[in-house]
């Protein structure tokens, strides 16, 4: 029987927990079974993450609800692969900070690790005022160009899918999530100090105006530093750190799983295969720029300066 590393064993036995972003539901991910099939895991809990991010009064509370749900539904020794989009990514990072032993993998989609700046907090308050004054549909009309790539904005089926999710979530939950986002912690240290046995996948859209590509680059830099730190502090070389990669999609905005579902699923599958040790030819940390047909070759990007992202996420 072949030798399996700790992260390989934990990954194969884990429960996948999708965590949708602000104002969104798990319809963002098309269906939970598709994610589970792509990651080749035995179980997908398609309701736990959504319930946590929609009902919790804060991001730490959402993370605690996820851990409690894992205990109650799947057992206290079960670990999770979290698929966190935007606001859901913030909840995933909260869980990674306080309960890293419950993580078998971390997929961060269209999110970032910094806390809000004072300017972003002001813009969030302005969004709440607009919501109260003009309603949820008017707010979404203002936000839509920041959420979707130009080609996606022209797709009526896609925009209606977004509107359906927003209507389901509602104004009260949106306001609660906005306030939670403004109060969230800075998680640069969380990602940099993540235990070496937790594999990571970073996903972003090249036309994302909410968490632009520089947010992805910062997370890449932190994961590179993570490898270097474990090598210098504990004598673990890069091969001893669970695989991580980052993926940036052309023709996609903030809602990658909705805008590029086939390519998103393909990247989950490729990363899963790498974690399981079947894709030995892919180097850790390479940024893949994928079109819908995956016709482009991987490229390594240069580091770019950080600037605060848009306030919706």
Image (cartoon, rainbow, N blue to C red):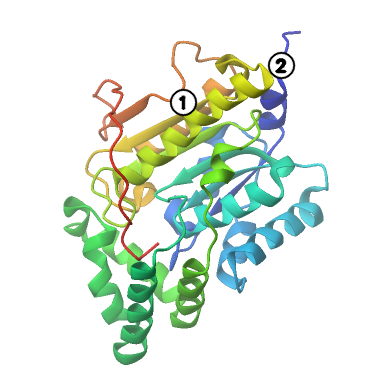
Q: Residue at x 23, y 48 (%)?
A: 207
Q: Looking at the image, which residue sits at the far right?
A: 76
- Dividing the picture into quadrants, the one containing residue 150 is bottom left
10 to 64, vertically: above or below: above
User: From this viewpoint, which residue is outermost toward the bottom?
Assistant: 133
Task: Please say if 186 is above or below 232.
Answer: below
Q: Residue at x 31, y 91 (%)?
A: 133
The reply, left or right, for residue 119 in relation to residue 228 is left
Q: Which residue is mark 2?
A: 4
- The answer to which quarter of the image holds residue 185 is bottom right
Please name the residue shown 24% across and 24% down the image. Answer: 295
Q: Position of residue 75 (x, y in %)?
A: 82, 48
Q: Provide residue 272's location: percent of width, then percent of height.
A: 54, 28
Find residue 164 and report its horizontal and vertical position in percent. 38, 70
Most extreme residue toward the front, as rendered? 233
Q: Quadrant of the N terminus?
A: top right
As drawn, is 255 to the left or to the right of 79? left
Quarter of the image containing the C terminus? bottom left
Q: Tag 2's secondary structure? A: loop
Residue nearest the observer in this picture, 115 or 5: 115
Foreground of the two, 77 or 189: 189
Image mark for residue 270: 1
Numbered disc 1: secondary structure: helix
Depth-wise, is mark 1 or mark 2 nearer the camera? 2
Image x and y of residue 41, in percent: 63, 34
Q: Where 164 sits versus 245, above or below? A: below
Side of 180 relative to 104 (left or right): left
Query: Within 10 angstroms of label 2, few (less than 14), some, or many (20 or more) residues?
Result: few
Q: Is residue 155 above or below residue 96?
A: below
CA separation, marks 1 and 2? 18 Å
Report the residue that reaches farthest toward the top.
1
Q: Going from the N terminus, do you reach mark 1 or mark 2 first?
A: 2
């Amino acid at each position: 029987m072949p030798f399996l590393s700790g992260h390989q064993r934990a990954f194969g036995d884990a429960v996948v927990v999708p965590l949708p972003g602000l104002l969104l539901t798990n319809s963002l991910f098309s269906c939970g079974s598709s994610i589970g099939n792509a990651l080749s895991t035995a179980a997908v809990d398609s309701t736990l993450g959504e319930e946590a991010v929609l009902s919790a009064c804060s991001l730490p509370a959402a993370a605690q609800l996820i851990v409690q749900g894992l205990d109650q539904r799947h057992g206290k020794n079960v670990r999770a692969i979290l698929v966190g989009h935007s606001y859901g990514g913030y909840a995933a990072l909260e869980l990674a900070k306080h309960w890293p032993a419950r993580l078998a993998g971390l997929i961060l989609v269209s999110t970032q690790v910094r806390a809000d700046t004072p300017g972003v907090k002001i813009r969030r308050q302005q969004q709440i005022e607009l919501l109260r004054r003009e309603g949820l549909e008017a707010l979404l009309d203002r936000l839509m160009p920041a959420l979707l790539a130009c080609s996606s904005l022209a797709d009526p089926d896609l925009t209606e899918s977004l509107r359906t999710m927003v209507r389901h979530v509602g104004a009260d939950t949106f306001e609660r999530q906005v306030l939670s986002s403004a109060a969230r912690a800075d998680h640069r240290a969380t990602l940099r100090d993540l235990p070496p046995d937790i594999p990571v996948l970073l996903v972003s859209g090249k036309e994302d105006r909410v968490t632009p590509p520089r947010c992805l680059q910062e997370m890449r830099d932190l994961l590179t530093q993570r490898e270097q730190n474990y090598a210098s502090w504990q004598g673990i070389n890069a091969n001893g750190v669970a695989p991580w990669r980052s993926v940036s999609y052309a023709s996609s905005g903030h809602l990658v799983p909705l805008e590029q579902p086939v390519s998103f699923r393909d990247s989950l599958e490729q990363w899963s295969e790498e974690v399981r040790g079947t894709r030995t030819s892919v180097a850790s940390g390479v940024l893949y720029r994928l079109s819908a047909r995956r016709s482009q070759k991987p490229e390594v990007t240069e580091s770019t300066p950080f600037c605060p992202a848009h306030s919706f996420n």
